[in-house]
Image (tube, rainbow, N blue to C red):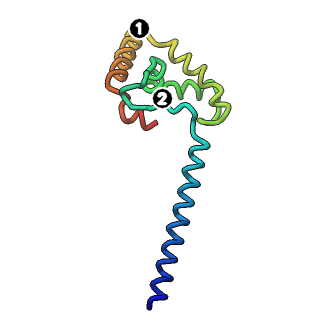
């Protein structure tokens, strides 16, 4: 009976050592492949929200329609993405002063309170 218990202890110790070795290798990999400048990101505290970010979030469907019209390609393809900046510019250029003021108020609120959870999820 003692030899069977010794065998279990030995097996358990091997499994533990193997797990420890794998964990060390994973930690080493992350240390080798992590960014050098580690920045702490705390939502709502250190996030700079731009007016462009607010426009992209609030006018997402209009921007996508404009890019679809410009590119005539499937959404997400390389051709479609090449026209995204132009579509964003066209939608932004078509905004009136009231909409810009409303987006500026949203930007200030997002700067103060943090991004809404649905925006953070994207």
Which residue corresponds to the image point at 57% horizontal and 36% vertical from the top-left? 35
Q: Is residue 101 left or right of residue 78?
A: left
Which residue matches tag 2?
Answer: 61
Q: Are marks 2 and 1 in contact (CB under 8 Å)?
A: no
Residue name at image x 56 percent, y 24 percent: 66
Q: Residue furthest top?
A: 97
User: Residue 106 location, x and y as percent?
Assistant: 36, 20
Q: Residue furthest right?
A: 79
Q: Nearer the viewer, residue 61 or 69?
A: 61
Q: How many marks?
A: 2
Secondary structure at numbered mark 2: helix
Instruction: Name the residue at 45% across, 88% down.
Output: 2
Q: In the figure, residue 37 lies in which quadrant?
A: top right
The part of the image, by quadrant, that contains residue 74 is top right
Q: Residue at x 55, y 16 (%)?
A: 90
Mark 1 is surrounded, within 10 Å at the Cα level, by few (under 14), some (14 to 19) or many (20 or more) other residues, namely few
Relative side of 109 to 67, left or right: left
Q: Toward the viewer: 50 or 95?
A: 50
Residues 69 and 14: in front is: 14
Mark 2, Cα crowd under 10 Å, few <14 / some 14-19 / many 20+, is: few
Task: Residue 120: give x, y in percent of width and height.
Answer: 42, 34
Query: Residue 2's mark?
Result: none
Q: Position of residue 93 (x, y in %)?
A: 52, 12
Q: Element under label 1? A: helix
Looking at the image, residue 48 lies above or below residue 73: above
Q: Quadrant of the N terminus?
A: bottom left
Place of residue 98 in the rendered image (x, y in percent of width and height, measured from the top left): 37, 10
| Label drawn at residue 97 | 1
3D distance between C-alphas at marks 2 and 1 = 20 Å
Mark 1 or mark 2, which is nearer the start of the sequence? 2
């Amino acid at each position: 009976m003692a030899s069977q218990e010794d065998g279990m202890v030995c097996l358990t110790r091997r499994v533990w050592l193997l797990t420890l070795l794998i964990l060390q290798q994973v930690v080493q990999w992350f240390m080798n492949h992590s960014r050098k400048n580690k920045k702490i990101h705390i939502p709502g505290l250190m996030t700079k929200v731009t007016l462009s970010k607010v426009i992209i979030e609030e006018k997402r469907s209009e921007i996508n329609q404009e890019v679809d019209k410009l590119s005539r390609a499937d959404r997400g393809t390389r051709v479609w993405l090449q026209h995204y900046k132009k579509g964003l510019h066209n939608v932004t250029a078509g905004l009136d002063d009231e909409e810009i003021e409303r987006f500026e108020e949203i930007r200030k609120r997002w700067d103060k309170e943090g991004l809404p959870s649905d925006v953070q999820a994207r």
